[in-house]
Amino acid sequence: MTTWSEYKRKRPLRGEAKRSYEAAQTKMGIGYLILQARAAAELSQTELARRIGTSQPMIARWESGAQLPSVSSLLRIAEATGFDLAVSLRKPGSTREFQVVGTASPSRTSRQPKHARRVSAAKRKVG
């Protein structure tokens, strides 16, 4: 019986299939990082969604790799889970790297959902 590793060595992906596979790995990697941060913070998907102002289904899509979050969403996730966001760019096979670290802002730790901000703004106008 041939193992998956042996099969991949004998028949490496090429062209479009290779690019698609690598793109899927990236999405899954980011989703897994979100899941790990959420679990480390002991948050449910619903609680994380509430903290960052999105929906539970959106958290599920990010964690499954079905959709990639924006950088601003990643910053909010990091903030809500108590992590810093680090982004780096590096050429394959190179030791040269460009890195940026985004830290959580203490003033935004309890972000309201968008609909709650609209209600608060409406109340300020009326009152």
Image (cartoon, rainbow, N blue to C red):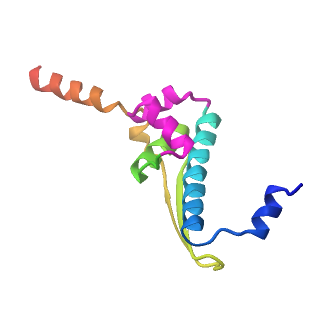
Q: Quadrant of residue 8?
A: bottom right
| Residue furthest to the front | 1
| Residue furthest to the right | 1
Q: Position of residue 92 (x, y in %)?
A: 62, 76
Magenta span covers which residues?
42-66
Q: Quadrant of residue 112?
A: top left
The quarter of the picture where the N terminus appears is bottom right
Q: Is residue 92 above or below residue 54?
A: below
Answer whether residue 54 is magenta in the image: yes
Q: Is residue 7 above or below residue 111?
A: below
Q: Is residue 69 above or below residue 60?
A: below
Q: Position of residue 91 (x, y in %)?
A: 58, 76
Q: Position of residue 29 (x, y in %)?
A: 60, 52
Q: Nearer the viewer, residue 100 or 115?
A: 115
Answer whether residue 39 is magenta in the image: no
Q: Residue at x 51, y 35 (%)?
A: 60
Callout count: 0
Q: Position of residue 34 (x, y in %)?
A: 56, 43
Decide whether the magenta segment is chiefly helix, strand or loop. Answer: helix
The quarter of the picture where the C terminus appears is top left
| Residue furthest to the top | 127
Q: Residue at x 11, y 26 (%)?
A: 125
Instruction: Give left or right: position of 35 versus 74.
Output: right
Q: Nearer the viewer, residue 115 or 102?
A: 115
Q: Residue at x 54, y 58 (%)?
A: 86
Q: Is residue 68 above or below residue 37?
A: below
Instruction: Give left or right: position of 39 versus 89.
Output: right
Q: Residue at x 60, y 40 (%)?
A: 35
Instruction: Give left or right: position of 120 versus 36.
Output: left
